[in-house]
Image: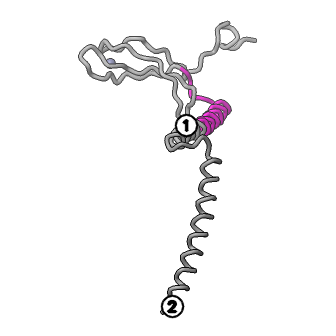
């Protein structure tokens, strides 16, 4: 008993697999691009490049069959995790940049640490409170003389 797939001895190539010419009829070379779309992540396709006359060639041909659901979900999960990691990295980088800027600003006004500045602020608050009390006393003394 024979069927066409086993008798040929060759791999049964799906009709979805495309064989792309490297050069379009217009003379432009095509470029193999990997898709990162949600529907076909990881799918490779040939796209036309700018040709000799400076026009974008519209050549298109798929190289891989459509991405199956398992691989699409896997790629999309990885894409999401990379995006989240990049956001975390950006936040850390921004924090480091802000920290350097703050440290530089602090040292430009004579402080070595934020704690040193906070101490001075607390001392100034106490000084202001004492002066306010002294002013209130002077006010009361002036009012009693009137
Ligand atoms: Zn073309």
Range of residues picked out in magenta? 64-90
Question: Is residue 95 shown left or right of residue 26?
Answer: right
Question: Is residue 1 shown left or right of residue 68?
Answer: right
- Residue at the far left in the pictured view: 53
Is disc 1 placed on a helix, strand or loop? helix
| Disc 2 target residue | 145
Q: Position of residue 93 (x, y in %)?
A: 57, 36
Q: Residue at x 32, y 21 (%)?
A: 57
Residue 42 among those drawn in magenta: no
Question: Is residue 68 shown left or right of residue 105?
Answer: right
Q: Residue at x 57, y 43 (%)?
A: 111
Q: Position of residue 48 (x, y in %)?
A: 37, 20
**Vertical placement of 89 versus 141: above or below?**
above
Residue 100: give its label. Answer: 1
Q: Which residue is at the front of the view, 137 or 46?
A: 137
Q: Main secondary structure of the magenta part?
A: helix
> Number of numbered discs present?
2
Q: Residue at x 60, y 40 (%)?
A: 112
Q: What is the CA distance from the residue labelled 2 to the residue labelled 1?
A: 56 Å
């Amino acid at each position: 008993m024979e069927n066409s797939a086993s008798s040929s001895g060759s791999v049964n190539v799906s009709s979805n697999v495309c064989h792309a010419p490297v050069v379009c009829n217009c003379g432009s070379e095509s470029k193999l691009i990997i898709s990162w779309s949600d529907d076909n992540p990881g799918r490779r396709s040939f796209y036309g490049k700018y040709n000799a006359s400076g026009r974008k060639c519209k050549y298109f041909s798929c190289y891989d069959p459509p991405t199956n659901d398992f691989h699409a979900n896997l790629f999309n999960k990885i894409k999401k995790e990379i995006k989240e990691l990049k956001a975390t990295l950006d936040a850390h980088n921004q924090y480091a940049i802000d920290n350097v800027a703050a440290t530089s600003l602090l040292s430009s006004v004579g402080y070595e640490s934020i704690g040193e500045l906070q101490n001075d602020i607390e001392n100034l608050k106490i000084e202001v409170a004492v002066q306010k009390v002294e002013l209130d006393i002077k006010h009361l003394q002036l009012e009693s003389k009137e």
